[in-house]
Image (tube, rainbow, N blue to C red):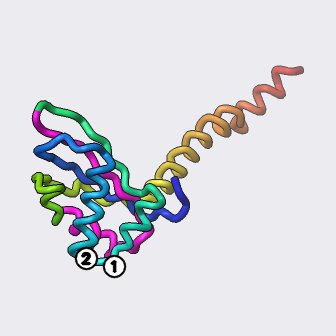
Amino acid sequence: MDDNWTYVIEAKFKMENNFSRSKIIMGISKNIKDNFGDFLNIDEMLKKKRLRINIMNNPGKKVGQINLFTELNQVEAAVLAATLETVERIESKKIEIDILKIKDLKVELREIVVNRAKEILSSSFMDSSPTKSELRKMVLQSN
């Protein structure tokens, strides 16, 4: 996980045509720039490979998932997500994009750290530290 990423926008898409991953990325980028200019700095996101597309081929249609990693603030991330949904065509072919969720990566990282700390605490400290009564029994047994 890149330290600068704050949110990941997760979306799904359906298309009429079988375009390559790079054509889909460029089509999304072009639509966003045409409609909103450089306000969302989509070119910078593309340079840093923050727009990821997973494609599942179905007969006659292409479906997949979009993950867009961003360091924008909460409001800007929401605007970017809404902007993604405005993309309706790539090279005259219809595309439907629906936002699934926006994940806060810092919250997710905290949850991972807390859960792992709980595991470490329960397995490392609890098993190895005898209680007072167990310690007393161990000392008495050694006599």
Which residue carries the number 2 mark? 36
Q: Residues within 10 Å of mark 1 (few under 14, many from 20)?
A: few
Which residue carries the number 1 mark? 39
Residue 138's x, y, as percent?
79, 26
Q: Which picture quadrant has residue 105?
A: bottom left
Q: Are marks 1 and 2 in contact (CB under 8 Å)?
A: yes
Query: Does residue 106 appear in the picture of this structure?
Result: no
Q: Which residues are magenta?
A: 60-85
Going by the numbered disc 1, the residue's amino acid type is: Phe
Q: Element at badge 1?
A: loop
Q: Residues within 10 Å of mark 2 (few under 14, many from 20)?
A: some
Q: Is residue 97 left or right of residue 110?
A: left
Q: Which picture quadrant has residue 143?
A: top right
Q: Which mark is residue 7?
A: none
Q: Element at badge 2?
A: helix
The residue furthest front is: 91
**How far separated are the C-alphas under marks 1 and 2?**
6 Å
Residue lying at 34% horizontally and 52% vertically, measured from the top left: 67
Residue 134's x, y, as percent?
71, 31
Residue 124's x, y, as percent?
66, 37
Query: Does residue 6 appear in the picture of this structure?
Result: yes
